[in-house]
Amino acid sequence: MMNNYTPKKPFDCYKWYFATKAPTEALGDPAVLLGLISRIAPLANKGNISYSSNDFKLVMENMHKDTVTTINLSERVGDRNLMRNSAQYWKLFGLIPQNSRGEIKITPFAQDIVNGKISQIDFAATMIVSLTLPNKVSYSNEEILSWRDNNLSIHPFKLILQILRELFLVSAFDAWITNEELYSIVIPMAGDHKKPKEIIKFILQYRNDKSIIDGWYNAVPRSNDKRFSSEFLRFLANFGFIEKEFELISSSTRNTTKFKYIPELDEQISVLINGSWTTERSDILQSVRQLDIENLVRQSANTRASARPKQQQFRKSLIENLERCVITGNMLTRVLQAAHIKPYAYGGSDDISNGLLLRADIHIMFDAGLINLRPDPFYKNRCFIELSDDDLVRRSYPSFVNEITIQLPKFTNMENIEWRYENRLLGVNT
């Protein structure tokens, strides 16, 4: 098949859309995707507040100060507010209602994420299993009909993971994919109903000889199209299911950045992509939780973070200056870990002013947003400990249920503490 195969374009409008037809890469970042939900939840609970209101304007101004994005969030307010043109990002993942008529509302699913009852990793795993193309958020009725007429339905996240796993089974060295390979090979072949095992043969050959796709149709003819496909890869990387190589945002190599398979997650990923799943989100979520995938994803992310060149010195410096867990007081060095307040992925430094020494389980909870430090506005370097509303978390850590306070060291950067409190839903970025 390889020498004379050319994928057939199923229909003229065949494309992989990610949420909206005008993609904005920054909106898929957990700090924005989930962070916005966390910030508007109090407004949604009040009711009758619109996205064009001054309340939403204040939220957007604060988000703009806290996050580094490719758009000016502080300008996406009033009549030109963010949700007017980009609400599909949040609708696609079931975080806001399909029709809120401009009023700030979030779904019960989103509220459970904000309250810590649904972990960020379990949210992502649920989306990996359930998201299909086409869908009513991203596609018109006419486009959906074209897909159905060609008996075509694709689970994009599952397909990407299936391809990476097949590459891994061939060779761990080759277990990666680029956006260029996704839009040049995977999307055309998936539209032609080809299976992952067939697709990886072309990927491996393409790496040696790009001319093998000469004569294939261009699946990304418009300027935005390549950004659509990259969003699927970024989502998987942001939530720790694949690993992204370091990328220079302004670099011309954006589409050749490698997204790698994570072997430590192989068993869980195999179940995600090959298991039998219902279409009910609550049932999917329950099954995902039984996989205990969150624990493994975070362990894998922390292991990779620990391998960074300056991480060991960072921990050593914190132990020398703190000696104990800042929350529990535990002094047993072997269970103490160095946590970044502002994650490295968001520009946080390896200076001790950006660090907390935490007992291992507290570190996991801090990274997951299950335990948070809210700065006391009246006392310098003092924080309230806030625990998630999740019943199991509160039963497991009863001593933290009633907002106790702790005093952080004088060298702690309290601006970063405040940043982390406002941006506690960050995927697995460490």
Image: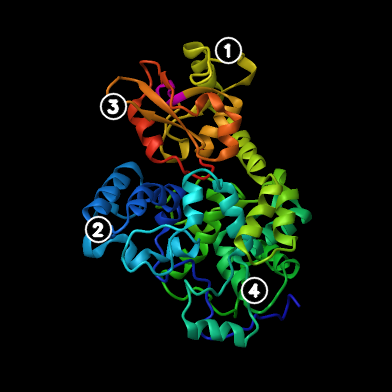
275 part of magenta stretch? no
For residue 190, the mark is: 4
**Residue depicted at 65% across the width and 72% down the height:** 212
Q: Position of residue 43 (x, y in %)?
A: 32, 51
Disc 4 versus disc 2: distance between alpha carbons? 39 Å
Which sits earlier in the primary sequence, circle 2 or circle 3? Answer: 2
Which sits earlier in the primary sequence, circle 1 or circle 4? Answer: 4
Dot 4 alpha-carbon crowd within 10 angstroms: few under 14, some 14 to 19, many 20 or more: many
Q: Mark 2: which amino acid?
A: Val
Mark 4 touches mark 2? (CB < 8 Å):
no
Q: Depth check: 261 or 109 in front? A: 109
Q: Mark 3: which amino acid?
A: Pro
Q: Residue 132 sits in which quadrant?
A: bottom right
Q: Which residues are magenta?
A: 351-355
Which sits earlier in the primary sequence, circle 2 or circle 1? Answer: 2
Disc 4 secondary structure class? helix
Taking the view exactly as shown, the residue that stands out farthest to the bottom is 149
The residue that label 2 is drawn on is 77
Q: Position of residue 86 (x, y in %)?
A: 37, 64
Q: Depth check: 25 or 212 in front? A: 25
Disc 2 versus disc 1: distance between alpha carbons? 48 Å
Q: Is 187 situated above or below 41?
A: below
Disc 3 versus disc 1: distance between alpha carbons? 29 Å
Dot 1 alpha-carbon crowd within 10 angstroms: few under 14, some 14 to 19, many 20 or more: some
Magenta residues, dominant SS class: helix
Disc 1 secondary structure class? loop
The residue that label 1 is drawn on is 331
For residue 70, the mark is: none
**Residue depicted at 49% across the width and 66% down the height:** 18
The residue that label 3 is drawn on is 377
Q: Depth check: 390 or 25 in front? A: 390
Disc 2 secondary structure class? loop
